[in-house]
Image (cartoon, rainbow, N blue to C red):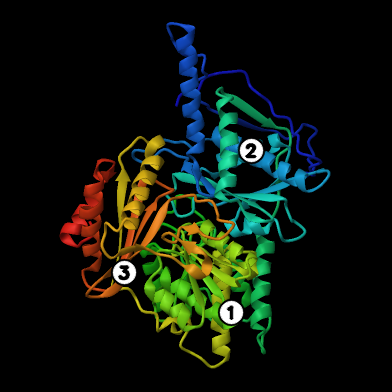
Amino acid sequence: MASTSAPSLYLQGNARKASFPSSTSTRPLRTTLTFSFPPPLTKVICVNSFSTAKYNEVFVDEEMDRIRRLQNGSDVRGVALEGEKGRTVDLTPPAVEAISESFGEWVINGLEKGRESVEEVRVSLGRDPRISGASLSAAVFAGLSRAGCSVFDMGLATTPACFMSTMLHPFAYDASIMMTASHLPYTRNGLKFFTRKGGLTSPEVEEICDKAARKYANRLTKVSTMLNTPPTRVDFMSSYAKHLRDIIKERVNHPLHYDTPLKGFQIIVNAGNGSGGFFTWDVLDKLGADTFGSLHLNPDGMFPNHIPNPEDKIAMALTRAAVLENSADLGIVFDTDVDRSGVVDNKGNPINGDKLIALMSAIVLREHPGTTIVTDARTSMALTKFITARSGHHCLYRVGYRNVIDKGVHLNQDGIETHLMMETSGHGALKENYFLDDGAYMVVKIIIEMVRMKLAGLDEGIGSLIKDLEEPMESVELRMNVISEPRHAKAKAVEAIEKFRSYIEEGRLKGWELDACGDCWVSEGCLVDSNDTPAAIDAHMYRVKVSDEEHGEHGWFHLRQSIHNPNIAVNMQSQVPGGCQSMTRVFRDKFLKTSGMVGILDVNQIDKFANSGRVV
């Protein structure tokens, strides 16, 4: 969108009692940021004043919606650079500045409600290596400063480290922002928000984005923002790495070499050119591990080798090859911002998805027998069997890592001991670690168990802990794009999913029944809390258990509104041959066609799989 000229607006440093490095120069340190906004509302040709007012009203509504659509559940995400076919840049510096200012004000208001006076509100910012990070970081600093916060620049960091910067002394910031778009392409970027209570919820982020939308609409001019004082640079990652090292040393408590408990172990790290390289040189190397053969440790915001994602087949294949070539004890794959991870055992077996949840469940259930484990509702029937065989309880809940983690928090508050919350994507949080989804901390738990097994004379490796986990015979994921303008896509998706629910409840699909998890007060397709304090629903989804006369209950079908893109995800698993194709045919013929939903959904993938049994 073209920019227009307008007088410059200067933002004086208004951070409350901020302490910054001194400069030998007598001139004030200044950072000038030039943001391009859409054309001002006055630039429009209309035949009368009524038409002008109507146009302005519609234009402002569209610009406000542009900001609101950046909300991605409990995060903010958008396109920060040109280069994606069919996508325009929407995460601009002006948008980021407005959102950051609104977050800063939200933090200040929250602190003021909790105590009589707030002299200084301190907020940190970390980022992954994306090439849009520098310009968007400047916008974050401007927004936070405008709100009245003192700003601290952590530089290259991880998402878990940003939260820990609110907890570990002497830092202990009031809040933190991580700039990342996780495993998405280099063109994307986003924001994750933390206070000392943890990550913000979807309703809280919605409130912040709504406020930011009004700010954004009121600033439809070209703005130059000048900061008389830059943010304070801090090295938090060194403290965070020491925190992880200390945990390993204390819990292994090696009888021969306490300070180097990983001596004799070879561990391969694949950081995918994201933020995870620090784990190699600042954690593993300093604990005595041999990390020769590690991959893609240097940060590169273009991600030239593969997507930094433990679910990515290329990332896992390369790590597996490195483990086997070097006869390593363990391989580790981090996503870009290290809030997720996956591993490869010493035999080259990839451990992610259900397998990673099973591995962590085995470790946690040894430490906390009988505990409840919360996962998203896309996990297998075999995983439930694995957990219950070890005297654990399995709570299936709605998809979304924030949903899964918050469910664990609420269960603990209600007196149900819940030590592990994990999503199939690799997000995993533990009660012992502030309910924080930290890929590095999860790997620390696995490494500690690996060393303990070795000290006990067990040489099979960590993969032996899940050798009895069965795999589903069939597992399929399909997508249906919503045929609608972007601003109406969410409503159309909800309409289709709720229509599906009504069909199930009315018994129109024989043998299909909404699933439930009574022990955890979860009903209506693992979506709705049936206790006295139900959590707000951020995205509509339902899990259905599928039975027939021949096989009994043999699989499940899950329909979910995507919060990333205007589509509906369809996941299913079956324990019988051809079960997924059969379910897809029933879904198409008995629901999509009879309900008329084929008019608002692109069912091309559904048709092809129903007809051929192959995912195209």
Does 343 sit above or below residue 115? below
> Which callout, 2 or 3, points at the residue further toward the start of the chain?
2
Between 507 and 222, the one nearer to me in the picture = 507
In this image, 297 relative to 258: left or right?
Answer: left
Residue 306 in picture, x, y percent from top left: 40, 58
Residue 44 in picture, x, y percent from top left: 46, 13
Q: Which residue was labeled with disc 2?
A: 102
| Residue at the farthest left position | 611
Residue 113 in picture, x, y percent from top left: 76, 45
At mark 3, the secondary structure is strand
| Residue at the farthest bottom position | 457
Does 482 sit above or below residue 308? above
Amino acid carrying label 2: it is Ser
Q: Which residue was labeled with disc 1?
A: 448
Residue at x-position 77% and y-position 48%: 114
Q: Which residue was labeled with disc 3?
A: 555
3D distance between C-alphas at marks 3 and 1: 36 Å
Amino acid carrying label 1: it is Ile
- For residue 373, say whether it is visible: yes
| Quarter of the C terminus within the rendering | bottom left
At mark 1, the secondary structure is helix
Amino acid carrying label 3: it is Gly
Q: Which mark is residue 74?
A: none
Q: How many marks?
A: 3
Q: In the picture, residue 29 is in which quadrant?
A: top right
Kindly report which numbered mark, 2 or 1, lies closer to the viewer in this rendering.
2
Marks 3 and 1 in Cβ contact (< 8 Å): no
At mark 2, the secondary structure is helix
> Which callout, 2 or 1, points at the residue further toward the start of the chain?
2
Q: Say few, some or many: other residues with alpha carbon within 10 Å of mark 2 (under 14 / 14 to 19 / 20 or more).
A: many
Residue at x-position 21% and y-position 48%: 593
